[in-house]
Structures are given as structure tokens and as C-alpha cells.
Amino acid sequence: MLKRLLTFRWIITTLLVIAGVGVLIRLGIWQLDRLEWRRAFNARATAQMTAPALDLNASQPVEDLYDMEYRSVTVTGRYDFSQEVLLRNQVWDNRLGFHVLTPLQVSGTEWYVLVDRGWIPFEDAADREKYYETGTVSVQGMIRRSLEKPDFGGVPDPTLAPGETRLDAWNVVNVPRVTAQSGLRLLPIYIDQAPDIAWTGLPYRSLPEIEISEGPHLGYALQWFTFATILSLGYPFFVRRQLARQSRQVENQPKVITGQTEVGRGS
């Protein structure tokens, strides 16, 4: 039997099975890593969502803001509409449009914070002055992290061509690039402005729904490990069955008689 297993066919098959088991185990480990990441995210997001609202007009360590994503925040200041930009591919009630991102100077400081003021229709992008909110305003919302690149499958923002000075419509909220473009002293986060029952017009405001769950990762991990177990334990039985079948086929082959000598594959 061992001699038959050392043929090219069985060596290749065995190597493929070993590789398959390794891939399945690695997929299971990857799902467990995803589960740990999800648990850490849940803990961080829950801690921030249950924390008291942060007042940006009070003295705050700027370097700590990045770790405060999903925390409620309040800020008072004045908008700088000259450096306003748009966020592409935003949908409201099945209508395509943009989100309006406007720098707000925090009252009493030299800092600005980028505020997502909400959704406007696609056709109003070139005529959005009617949505300006002048004077001193108070904003309530949620802290969000800046993004350097879109999610998997998304389109990254282009690099400015020679002679171009600014990008008006963006695919992600990339605060460092908006900072470089505007020349303003922007905080390293931005704010999703919360809906207000007193605000019924455009821009339409909304907050993201944060899912706090472990997702399907544990189930997927168990599934991959089960497949690896079935393949690793089932392969020897498959090999034994195949070799036994080959032996029976050889024994059942008709023998050829030449003179006084019987010649057959099973001899």
C-alpha cells in the first residue's frame, strides 16, 4: 500500500489536501481575529456612546479626540463657507445627493472643526449658498474619525492635477487633506450633526446607526474548523477505500495464458 501512495498522483493529492486543511484553519483563525476586533470595537463604541457629551468649546486635549469616536459632542462657533466641500454618493429617500461638510471655527479659539451639516440634492451642489447658516451657531452631533481611503471596493479621492488648487467633491472625509487644501487649523476629527426637531429643512441631518454585536464571526470560525476536521479525518478513509478498490480491480482482471505461463497484472 505504501508503494502505491508514493505515486505522483497520490503525492499531489495529499499535498493538495494538506494545503486545503491549512487554508481552512487559517480562515477559522482569521474569523476569530475578526471576532476579537469586533469585541474591542463594541467596548470602545459603547464607552463613548454612554459618556457625557463633550464640549469642544472647553479646553480639550486635541490628541485625545481621535479615540472619542461616537461620543456626543457640542460646539459653538461660526462657519467658514469659503472652504466648504461636498461628500459624494449620499442617498436620502432614494434620491442621490451630497453631504455638506463645512469648517466651523470654535468660538474663542483658533481651531476649526469640520461639520457634516447633512444631505442636499444632487442638483443643488452648484447653488448651495441658500443652505448657508450665518452668524454664531450651536452644533450637537457625534464625533467621527477621519478616513484616508474608502472601504473595500470604494473609489479613492484623486490627487490634484498640476494647476488645481482644491477638490470640491470628495469620496471620503479625509480631514488631513481638507486641512492641507483649506489652510485652516482643523481638529483631527469631524462631526456628524444630529437631527433637531426644530430643524425641518435642508440639509437633512442624520446620525449613523452603530451596530453593537459580535456578528457571525464565531459561527464562521466554527464552520471553517469543522470543514478542516472533516477533510483531515476523512482523507485517510478515502485513500484506504480507493486503494482497496484498485486492488479488487486488479484481482478481477482476466489473465492472459501464453504457452505454459500465465501472465496477469495480479501475478
Image (tube, grey):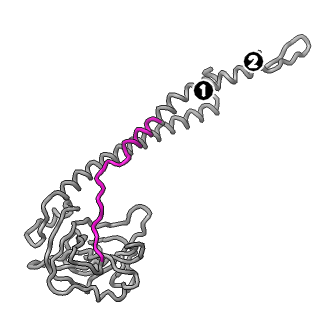
Q: Which residue is mark 2?
A: 251
Q: Residue furthest right?
A: 259
Task: Report x, y in % for residue 135.
Answer: 16, 86
At label 1, the amino acid type is Val
Q: Residue at x 61, y 31 (%)?
A: 10
Quarter where residue 153 is shown: bottom left
Q: Nearer the viewer, residue 53 or 177?
A: 53
Residue 77, placed above or below residue 38:
below
Quarter where residue 172 is shown: bottom left
Residue 241, placed above or below residue 137:
above
* Within-10-Å neighbours for mark 2: few <14, some 14–19, many 20+: some
- Give the numbered dot on residue 239: 1
Q: Residue at x 88, y 16 (%)?
A: 257
At label 2, the amino acid type is Glu
Task: Report x, y in % for residue 260.
Answer: 89, 10
Stretch in magenta? 204-226
Under circle 1, the secondary element is helix
Q: Residue at x 41, y 61 (%)?
A: 152
Viewport quadrant of the C terminus: top right
Q: Nearer the viewer, residue 253 or 55?
A: 55
Mark 1 → mark 2, Cα distance in angstroms? 18 Å
Q: Are marks 1 and 2 in contact (CB under 8 Å)?
A: no
Task: Report x, y in % for residue 207.
Answer: 27, 67
Q: Residue at x 22, y 51 (%)?
A: 43
Residue 213, placed above or below residue 71:
above
Viewport quadrant of the N terminus: top right
* Residue 25: in magenta span: no
Residue 75 horizontal side relative to residue 89, left or right: left
Under circle 2, the secondary element is helix
